[in-house]
Image: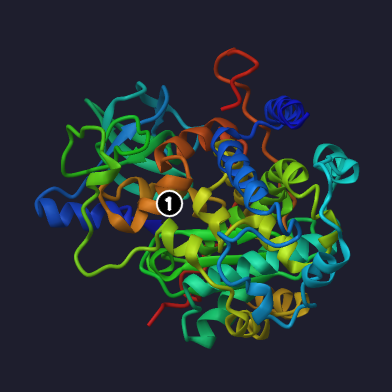
């Protein structure tokens, strides 16, 4: 019975993956193994989180406490595993509500900040928020609260989390020459949020979750469930997105920056800069693990742009650009 | 705003050779070279995909390059900086023109710099305090609009870019 359900889920996932263009292979394998192991270990107490999970962040937050304890006591160990039809239906056809998106995004953002704190320069952070918020206003998405932060790492990278959380590393910020380049980088990350790229990946992993969490489905609406969904820490950031999602974010982000009145060539200029970096630079190892090579991104963006932005004249605002200390 | 070199390329070039005032680049697709940074100007030559060029200057969405015997303006997005060829992960080394495929296990660390690695992210613990700090630094849409206006930024109507057509017809099961 269980095997049959697994096969069903995998075939559904395969279909879903093709339709949306996401690379699921690794994700599927990881998630499936995780869920299978959890299932085995959880026989005596099905509603408990997998032992592999480190101290759940939900315990240290001001968010509502997890409902696990309660449901663990209330739910008798089920005789056999069943797919939660609601959860399966959601994984196939559903959408996260804005509240769910905010909760998921906040959890990921909090985890990321646990790995790397904000740069202690309020003027810098304020500046990045002013630029980012203005670019985000051109995205057409006003149901999220946008927050921008420069994180204290020499790595060259940027991150987005659902719900409007955007981060740029100090290493990347230092390479920027003007406000238009910053707007381009932020535009790319804003596009990940407006296109819900991370949520789509999570939704697909929730289909796997629909099997493993069948027994513990009563533990819904707790941040432990969110944590189980997104995995350990900010793992989703390390895993990265499908490369087509990155190409899309380049196209969309460049346009957001142009709509904000900036020189549209900010993002391509940053990509040019990255393309010229030595391949063996440790500061870009995670970037290259999670993104296509900048040269491929330039080529793809070039196909999309061609002469379409020839008439767009924007500002680069090099004078106003906040130079990092 | 005219800028005479892509800063990174310039920086690296100065580290490698201090003589030439040009940065290497590779043409990403067959392109025309124009006499001015505009597609309505005269065609000064052409460059084929994979050709090496010298980048002389940058202006908006255009680069002034020398390709073989011709010099002219080419679209910024049709060239990649660096002499690493057409690109792809692991190729991007300006100094070593004949780059080999890099082995991720042999990535050399740049001295003194600590990178952010997937292990850091996987082991990260939720930091509520930093999140509160982040919230406190956020701005309102009104504040952002006013800041934009101070430098004369105004919303511009720019249509979305089309999704590029797939370059080749591949199996429908190939989702990459």
**Above or below, A72 relative to B51:** below
Relative to A191, residue B133 above or below: below
Task: For mark 1, give the secondary structure.
Answer: helix
User: Compared with residue A118, is residue A73 higher up or lower down, i.e. above or below?
Assistant: above
**Picture residue at 31% right of the left edge, 39% below the top:** B90
Q: In the image shown, does A30 or A253 lie closer to the viewer?
A: A30
Q: Quadrant of residue A256?
A: bottom right
Nearer the observer, A163 or B47 = A163
Q: Position of residue A100 (x, y in %)?
A: 81, 61
A12 on left or right of A79 = left
Q: Which residue is mark 1?
A: A287
Above or below A248: residue A227: below
Residue positioned 47% across, 77% down in the render? A322
Indicate the quadrant containing the C terminus of chain A: top left, top right, bottom left or bottom right.
Answer: bottom left
Rate crowding at label 1 as few (under 14), some (14 to 19) or many (20 or more) other CA atoms within 10 Å.
Answer: many
Which chain does tag 1 point to? A
Q: Position of residue A69 (x, y in %)?
A: 78, 71
Task: Report if residue A143 is visible in the image.
Answer: no
Quadrant for residue A111, please give it: bottom right
Q: Relative to A28, is B16 on the left or the right?
A: left
Residue closest to the eye, B22 or B17: B17
Q: Quadrant of the N terminus of chain A?
A: top right
The answer, for residue B81, to whether it is visible in the render is: yes
Q: Residue A270, image x and y in percent?
A: 43, 54
């Amino acid at each position: 019975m269980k095997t049959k359900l697994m096969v069903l889920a995998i075939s559904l996932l395969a279909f879903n993956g093709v339709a949306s263009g996401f690379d699921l292979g690794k994700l599927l394998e990881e998630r499936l193994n995780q869920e299978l192991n959890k299932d085995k270990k959880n026989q005596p107490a099905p509603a408990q989180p997998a032992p592999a999970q480190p101290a759940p962040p939900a315990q240290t937050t001001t968010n509502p406490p997890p409902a696990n304890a309660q449901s663990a006591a209330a739910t008798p160990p089920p005789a056999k595993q069943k797919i939660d039809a609601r959860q399966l239906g959601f994984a196939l056809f559903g959408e996260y509500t804005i509240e769910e998106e905010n909760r998921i995004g906040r959890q990921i953002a909090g985890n990321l900040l646990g790995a790397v704190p904000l740069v202690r320069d309020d003027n810098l952070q304020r500046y990045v928020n002013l630029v980012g918020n203005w670019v985000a206003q051109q995205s057409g998405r006003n149901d999220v609260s946008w927050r921008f932060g420069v994180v204290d790492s020499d790595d060259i990278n940027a991150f987005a989390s659902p719900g409007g959380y955007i981060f740029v590393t100090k290493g990347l910020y230092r390479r920027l020459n003007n406000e238009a380049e910053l707007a381009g980088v932020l535009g790319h990350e804003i596009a990940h949020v407006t296109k819900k790229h991370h949520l789509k990946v999570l939704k697909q992993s929730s289909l796997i979750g629909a099997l493993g969490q069948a027994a513990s489905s009563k533990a819904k609406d707790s941040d432990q469930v969110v944590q189980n969904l997104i995995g350990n820490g900010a793992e989703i950031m390390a895993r990265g997105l499908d490369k087509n999602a990155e190409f899309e974010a380049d196209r969309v982000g460049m346009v957001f920056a142009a709509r904000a009145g900036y020189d549209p060539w900010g993002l391509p200029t940053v990509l040019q800069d990255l393309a010229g970096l030595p391949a063996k630079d440790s500061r870009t190892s995670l970037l290259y693990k999670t993104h296509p090579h900048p040269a491929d991104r330039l080529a793809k963006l070039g196909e999309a742009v061609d002469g379409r932005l020839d008439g767009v004249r924007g500002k680069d605002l090099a004078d106003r650009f906040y130079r990092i200390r | 705003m005219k800028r005479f070199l892509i800063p990174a390329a310039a920086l690296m070039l100065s580290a490698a050779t201090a003589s030439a005032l040009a940065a290497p680049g590779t043409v990403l697709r067959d392109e025309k070279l124009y006499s001015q940074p505009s597609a309505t100007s005269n065609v000064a030559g052409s460059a084929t995909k994979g050709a090496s060029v010298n980048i002389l200057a940058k202006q908006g969405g255009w680069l002034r390059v020398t390709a073989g015997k011709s010099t002219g303006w080419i679209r910024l997005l049709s060239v990649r900086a660096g002499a690493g060829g057409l690109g792809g992960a692991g190729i991007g080394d300006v100094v070593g023109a004949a780059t080999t495929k890099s082995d991720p296990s042999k990535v050399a660390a740049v001295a003194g710099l600590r990178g952010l690695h997937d292990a850091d992210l996987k082991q990260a613990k939720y930091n509520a305090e930093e999140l509160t700090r982040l919230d406190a630094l956020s701005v309102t849409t009104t504040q952002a609009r006013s800041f934009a206006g101070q430098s004369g930024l105004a919303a511009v109507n720019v249509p979305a870019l089309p999704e590029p057509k797939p370059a080749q017809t591949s199996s429908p099961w190939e989702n990459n």
